[in-house]
Each structure stands twice: as structure tokens, then as C-alpha cells.
Image (spheres, helix red, strand yellow):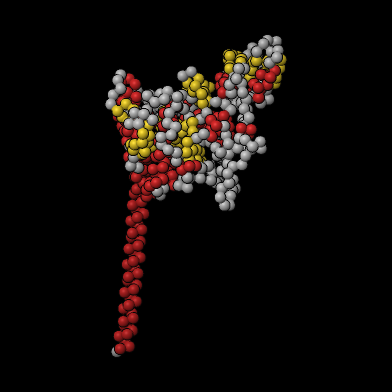
């Protein structure tokens, strides 16, 4: 009897143990299932927020995709466009009265192959650039425009959604970089994102009033911002990044500096809250409601994965700068060869201080970049100084727009383009630089910007540049300076870091 009771007791213990494990397993499975279901519902909701734009408007004549390095890593180029569309709630937040959409902000974010460095390059909206053929809503394509305002690319087709594919085509043509992803954020989305992170720390060099935001107001109005540090969100954050007048020279360049400072603070705030999916979900919910993205980023999971992939980028290694520029009347011209060196460095995945981000990670502490062969960075970045040299520019081909591009390259290096016209003969195969008595040295400086150009003494005084079929075949490009082994020119290397003080470098002029 006792043996039977003992045996029966053991069986009961095992039975209860099995039942307990089964309950635990089912409980765990149920919990996991609920978690998966909840996560699925969250992603389903976020996916429903997103809008995408089609790829049929993206140019077929694109730069090659970046190659993977020895570790299988590739850099990523993301184009961020700020749209002031008048559609929906955007009008109430300052989108304006007219129809259509414009891009007041454009930043090319280059994430290096090591995913430990990133640089955001702002392209001023008034920059004069070549806008390539772009697709209209009726599926026809426009003709290319050799010298147009950069932000007009987004307005091609005059739709409320804008034309992000055209802006992407323009940036690819400008930089020679393949854009992997394009993201458009409008006023409403921007305001909501700042609320989702609990506000952003900003700074202003002086008090700002309503009349600074709206010069048509006719009077100073009430104070919007006090000078110094403050935390802002929503409409106030939107006002901050849109203010132009009353600060510095009132230009878009100064506003760009404040936008870079704002993004630096926003990144700092997000990283302080933790770069994990749980912490990112509130921000993702706010952002996806007003984001338009390319189809490659057309899901919440892909967007969050991209954001999380940046978690190892130190704030100091996130840089912001404005593309090298100068005023050209009321517009902005890009400065050559500085801008060419910037694009070449990014194509080669070199950081602004000359490091190769595609190189295998070094053992031990990171070494500081060494000096150049001559012991200075400037020796590695030779430049052509055309100050005081006047050049007449002629198009010796039937290809339109060449004189404009060549003149911009000349003026970017200090030359003065005295005129632009068609040559008497439109069948020049090679580019020609003619010069008058005693002007060979000046002509040689011109020829240095145009590889393969032939020098030839002329009958008249002055330097004349006649562009040939070789220049047209090269896409109208001048000499591409070699990527420097050391730091880039100061117009490029003096960039804002995301950990800089919010009060530094906030305006221009």
C-alpha cells in the first residue's frame, strides 16, 4: 500500500509538473503572439500613414550605385526635401496662398560605409544649377534647363505633391552621386515630429518679432522668440526654421545655418532618448503621417531600420555644411573647384578631414589623419586663381547651355566671363583657348580648368575660350580635381558638428 501510494505520489508530481510546463509554454506563446500581433498592428498603422512616389519619373541616365567595400559595407545617400506644399493643414501652418508645392530646404545626407560618420550638405534653394529632363504628370518629359533655380525642380508639373523625382534627378546630375532614398517632409509633419520628441533646444542671436517672419506685416508685431537658448516645438519650431528677415543679411543662407543647427539639436534629442524601435515609434508615428518617400523606403520597418542603423554615429561625427557658394546678383552660384572636390570626396567615401571611411577598421584607437606630403593640407588641394583675368566664352558646338556652365566654372575660380555667344563655326571638335600678345600665362590658367584644351595665339588682345565637342561629350564638366589626401578646402571642411553649441554660427552677413 505504501509502495503504491509512493508510486502514485510520484506520478501526481510529474503530472502537475507537465501541466505547469504546458501552462507556462502556452502563456509564453500567447504573450509572444500578442506582442507580435501588437507590433504588427503598429507597423500596419505606420505603413498606412506613409505616402510614396513612383520611380517612373527617376532619370534612366543615373550615376552608378556605390560599390561595397571589402567588409561588404556600402555608403548611403539620402535626399531630404522640405516641402511648403499648400495642401491640407500645411496652409494653416504657413504654407501660403498659392497652389503647388516648393522646396525651401534640400539636404543631401551621405552616410559613410562605416556607418560611424555622416555629413548633411545643404543646397541653397536659389542656387543656379542644371535641371535635367523631368517627367510631367501626363508622363511626358520636359527639356533640360542649363541654368535654373534649384528649388524650381520640385515645382515641375505644378502639383500639390511636388516633384521629388525631378529634384532627385537634379541632385544626381549636380553631384555625380546616386541617390539611394528620397524623403519629403511637409510643414505639418515637421511640426508634429518636434512635439513627439518633447521639443528641441534652439538658440537665436537676438530677439525675433512677427514682422521678421512676415515682412509684409508692416510693423514689428509681438515677440516670437527671445535671444538665447529655448526649447520649442510645433508651430514655434516651424517658425524658427523659416525665419529669414531681421537676422544677418536676411538671406536664405543664414536660414540654412539655423536649419542645420536645428537638425543637430533634433538628432541630439532623439539619440538621448535611445535609438531603439520602442523609443522611435512615437517619432515614427508623427513622421510617417506627413512623409512622402521613394518606394525603397515605403514601409515603416524599412524607415525604422534605416534610423536604427545610424545609432553608432557619434554626434561629433555628424557634420552639416552648405555647398560652397557665392552670390551672383540675387541668385547663388556654386564655387568651383571647391564644390567639385566636395562631390569627389563623397563619391570616394572620404570624410571632410580626409579619412577613408571605406577602409577596414583599424585596431586600437583611431589615428589622426597624417599631414600631406608637403606638411599642409593646402598643398594637396591646388586651385586655379583667375582673379583679374577676363575670358570671352563661345560655344563651338550645337549643344545648348555649354557657355553658361563654362562661365560658372570660370567665375567660380575667380575669372571674369566677359560674354557668352555662339562661335562663328559650330563644328569645333576640341576646346580651344586663344590669347593675345603677352597673355599666354593667363590662357594657361584658363586651360587648366578644361582638360585637353588646346592653347593657340590669336590675332586680337584678350583670352577667348571656344568650347568643343569634347566638352559637350563630357557633360559640360570641367577638370575634376583629384580627391585630396588631407582635409578639403576650408569652404568645405569648416562644418557644423551635431554636438556644437546651439548658439554657434546661426546667421550670415
Which of the two residues, 104 or 203, is positioned nearer the viewer here? 203
Name the residue rendered at 59%, 42% in the picture. 369
The image shows residue 268, relative to residue 438, as above or below, that is below
Above/below status of 129 relative to 302: above
Say whether residue 265 is visible. yes
Tell me the quarter of the image containing the N terminus: bottom left
Which residue is at a point 40% across and 39% down the rendered structure image?
265
Residue 89 at what x, y percent from top left?
31, 32
Quadrant housing the C terminus: top left
> Which residue is the extreme one toward the bottom?
1
Give left or right: position of 491 versus 156: right
Q: Quadrant of residue 54?
A: top left
**Furthest-left residue in this view:** 222
**Residue 342 coordinates in the image, percent (x, y):** 55, 33
Residue 315 percent coordinates (x, y): 46, 43
What residue lies at 56% left-to-right and 23% top-to-bottom?
A: 412
**Residue displayed at 38% across by 47% down:** 273
Residue 293 seen: no
Q: Quadrant of residue 3?
A: bottom left
Q: Nearer the viewer, residue 73 or 55?
A: 73
Image coordinates of residue 234 in percent, x first then y, are 32, 36
Amino acid at each position: 500500500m505504501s509502495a503504491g501510494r509512493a508510486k502514485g505520489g510520484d506520478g501526481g508530481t510529474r503530472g502537475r509538473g507537465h501541466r505547469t510546463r504546458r501552462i507556462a509554454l502556452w502563456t509564453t506563446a500567447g504573450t509572444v503572439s500578442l506582442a507580435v500581433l501588437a507590433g504588427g498592428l503598429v507597423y500596419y498603422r505606420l505603413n498606412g500613414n506613409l505616402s510614396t512616389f513612383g520611380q517612373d519619373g527617376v532619370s534612366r541616365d543615373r550615376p552608378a550605385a556605390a560599390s561595397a567595400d571589402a567588409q561588404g559595407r556600402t555608403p548611403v545617400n539620402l535626399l531630404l526635401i522640405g516641402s511648403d506644399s499648400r495642401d491640407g493643414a500645411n496652409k494653416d501652418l504657413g504654407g501660403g496662398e498659392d497652389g503647388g508645392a516648393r522646396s525651401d530646404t534640400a539636404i543631401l545626407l551621405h552616410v559613410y560605409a562605416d556607418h560611424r560618420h555622416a555629413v548633411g550638405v545643404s543646397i541653397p534653394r536659389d542656387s543656379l544649377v542644371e535641371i535635367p529632363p523631368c517627367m510631367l504628370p501626363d508622363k511626358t518629359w520636359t527639356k533640360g534647363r542649363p541654368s535654373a533655380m534649384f528649388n524650381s525642380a520640385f515645382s515641375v508639373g505644378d502639383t500639390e505633391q511636388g516633384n521629388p523625382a525631378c529634384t532627385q534627378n537634379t541632385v544626381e546630375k549636380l553631384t555625380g552621386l546616386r541617390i539611394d532614398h528620397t524623403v519629403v517632409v511637409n510643414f505639418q509633419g515637421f511640426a508634429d515630429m518636434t512635439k513627439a520628441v518633447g521639443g528641441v533646444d534652439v538658440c537665436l542671436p537676438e530677439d525675433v518679432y512677427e514682422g521678421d517672419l512676415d515682412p509684409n506685416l508692416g510693423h514689428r508685431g509681438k515677440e516670437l522668440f527671445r535671444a538665447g537658448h529655448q526649447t520649442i516645438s510645433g508651430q514655434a519650431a516651424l517658425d524658427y526654421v523659416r525665419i529669414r528677415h531681421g537676422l544677418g543679411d536676411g538671406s536664405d543662407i543664414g536660414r540654412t545655418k539655423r536649419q542645420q543647427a536645428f537638425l543637430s539639436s533634433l538628432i541630439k534629442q532623439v539619440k538621448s532618448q535611445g535609438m531603439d524601435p520602442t523609443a522611435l515609434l512615437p517619432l515614427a508615428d508623427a513622421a510617417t503621417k506627413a512623409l512622402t518617400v521613394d518606394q525603397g523606403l515605403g514601409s515603416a520597418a524599412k524607415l525604422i531600420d534605416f534610423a536604427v542603423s545610424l545609432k553608432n554615429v557619434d554626434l561629433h561625427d555628424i557634420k552639416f555644411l552648405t555647398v560652397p557658394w557665392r552670390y551672383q546678383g540675387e541668385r547663388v552660384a556654386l564655387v568651383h573647384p571647391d564644390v567639385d572636390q566636395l562631390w569627389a570626396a563623397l563619391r570616394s567615401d572620404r570624410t571632410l578631414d580626409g579619412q577613408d571611411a571605406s577602409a577596414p577598421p583599424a585596431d586600437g584607437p583611431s589615428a589622426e589623419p597624417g599631414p600631406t606630403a608637403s606638411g599642409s593640407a593646402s598643398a594637396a588641394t591646388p586651385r586655379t586663381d583667375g582673379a583679374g583675368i577676363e575670358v570671352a566664352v563661345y560655344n563651338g558646338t550645337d549643344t545648348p547651355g555649354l557657355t553658361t556652365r563654362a562661365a560658372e566654372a570660370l567665375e567660380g575660380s575667380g575669372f571674369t566671363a566677359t560674354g557668352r555667344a555662339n562661335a562663328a563655326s559650330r563644328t569645333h571638335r576640341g576646346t580651344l583657348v586663344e590669347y593675345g600678345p603677352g597673355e599666354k600665362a593667363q590662357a594657361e590658367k584658363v586651360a587648366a580648368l578644361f582638360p585637353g584644351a588646346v592653347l593657340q595665339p590669336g590675332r586680337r588682345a584678350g583670352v577667348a575660350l571656344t568650347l568643343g565637342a569634347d566638352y559637350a561629350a563630357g557633360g559640360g564638366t570641367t577638370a575634376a580635381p583629384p580627391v585630396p589626401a588631407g582635409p578639403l578646402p576650408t569652404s568645405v571642411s569648416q562644418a557644423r558638428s551635431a554636438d556644437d553649441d546651439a548658439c554657434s554660427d546661426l546667421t550670415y552677413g
